[in-house]
Amino acid sequence: MPDVLLPVRDEAQAIAQVLAAMPSGFRPIVVDNGSRDGSGDLARSLGARVVYEPRPGYGAACHAGLEAAEAEVVCVMDCDCSLDPAELVAVAGPVSGAGADLVVGRRVATPGSWPLHARLANRLLAAELRRRTGVRLSDIGPMRAARRVDLLALGIEDRRFGYPLETILRAAGAGWRITEVPVSYTERTGRSKVTGTLRGTVRAVRDMAGALR
């Protein structure tokens, strides 16, 4: 039974729908990263396990969830209804079946769901990643799966938006088998704090540039 880490900050509008769509055999762990809208309490009332991480940052939330998880395989996904939890089966499958060490969901976006500035930034980062490591990924995606013990052993240091990129860089350096599978990507529920704004995208790119350095 894989654990699914759901980093959350003010996602009360989306949590119920995400949890209701969780596939059988996947156990959600909601990591409340300083929500002010009661996201954590709502998730707990809906039966999800909730971890509270006061340190701000996407990476801080992911790492707190990883430390709290107990399953052999862990998945990470955004909790804003932009991703379909049903597709966790395809993302986690190669890891559970020992065919891959890290699987990244390659976003196939519906019109209007992924702003141009965010797509371009992601494309540039993926190209630089391929140049440096030879890993042929086209997306630094928000849905991923790997083995918990192996992820902890990577020693990922970034606690902000560079966390996903550092994960891939360290995994490539460790000789992991890394692959991607397509996942649908639709317009999120609620206000975007990262890719939906130019300021948020610049902040994410800055953190990822730090991971590249």
Image (tube, grey):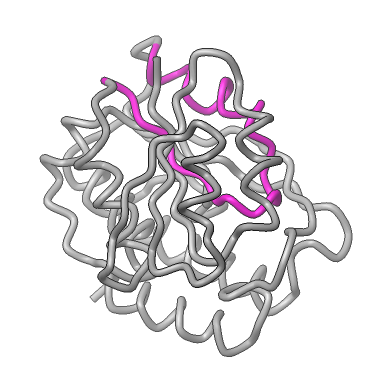
* Residue 168 x, y percent position in the rendering: 33, 50
Above or below — where is 149 with respect to 128? above
* Residue 208 x, y percent position in the rendering: 37, 72
- 105 left or right, relative to 197: left
In the rendered structure, which segment of residues is drawn in magenta? Answer: 72-96
Above or below — where is 163 with respect to 98? below
Rendered residue at 39%/46% (across/down) = 135
Corner quadrant of residue 146: top left
- 212 left or right, relative to 38: left
Name the outermost residue toward the top: 97
Corner quadrant of residue 117: bottom right
Quadrant housing the N terminus = top left
Name the outermost residue toward the bottom: 199
Above or below — where is 2 with respect to 213? above
Is 128 part of what is drawn in magenta? no
* Residue 26 x, y percent position in the rendering: 48, 21
Corner quadrant of residue 178: top left
User: In front here: 43 or 100?
Assistant: 43
Is 92 part of what is drawn in magenta? yes
User: In front here: 128 or 187?
Assistant: 187
* Residue 56 x, y percent position in the rendering: 32, 73
User: In front here: 129 or 55?
Assistant: 55
- 31 left or right, relative to 197: left
Quadrant housing the C terminus = bottom left
